[in-house]
Amino acid sequence: MNKCTYCGKEYPDEATVCELDEEPLIDPNKPKPSFFKIDITPTKESKKPKLPDEGLAKFCIIAGWAMVILPLFLPHDTGLKLRAAATGCMSLSWGHSQVAAAKKWRQKYGEPSTEELIEVKKTHSVSWPIWALVALVVLGIVFAALTGAKHEH
């Protein structure tokens, strides 16, 4: 038995449109489709998920600690120090979550293959110029803190 979506009049199963108001008919006993339902059941041909980038995660942890600790020694206002610390905390949080995800990935799938490691390096890893730049910035901040350099507005 089908029912009009507008007026509620019932029709036999063969009918598809209401005779009175020309609205579509639905079967009230049939479950409604969900537009938000996501099927996450793995298929046979599904691949392993991508290995999280531990190198980038460790970089974020180091940078996060630097952003939390180093501004404490600079002669800036408290608001600037707190903003730097908050950004550092976000970096620490993301870095630790990625390191944990990589550990879980290894527990579930074993050690990554050479191809998987190369793919991670191609797409995410922090290269040596970035490490060198970060080291220079950190050294500059430490030098500024030790020499008592003032921030001018």
Image (cartoon, rainbow, N blue to C red):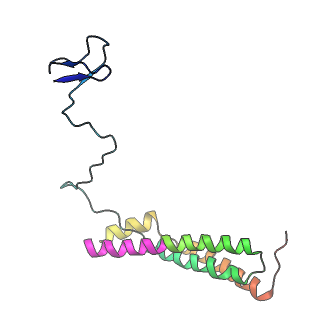
The residue range painted magenta reads: 95-108
Q: Residue furthest right?
A: 153
Q: Quadrant of residue 35?
A: top left
Q: Residue at x 25, y 16 (%)?
A: 17
Name the residue nearer the viewer: 63 or 140. 63
Quadrant of the snapshot with the N terminus = top left
Q: Residue at x 30, y 13 (%)?
A: 22
- Main SS category, magenta section: helix
Tell me if residue 122 comes above or below residue 140 in the rendering.
above
Quadrant of the snapshot with the C terminus = bottom right
Where does the image place residue 139, in percent across and percent down from the top left? Answer: 68, 83
Magenta stretch encompasses residue 104: yes
Name the residue nearer the viewer: 7 or 101. 7
Whether residue 111 is visible, yes or no, is: no
Magenta stretch encompasses residue 30: no
Q: Residue at x 32, y 73 (%)?
A: 104
Q: Is residue 82 left or right of residue 144?
A: left
Where does the image place residue 30, in percent across and percent down from the top left? Answer: 19, 34
Where does the image place residue 137, in percent across and percent down from the top left? Answer: 67, 77
Q: Residue at x 73, y 71 (%)?
A: 79
Q: Is residue 56 left or right of residue 50?
A: right
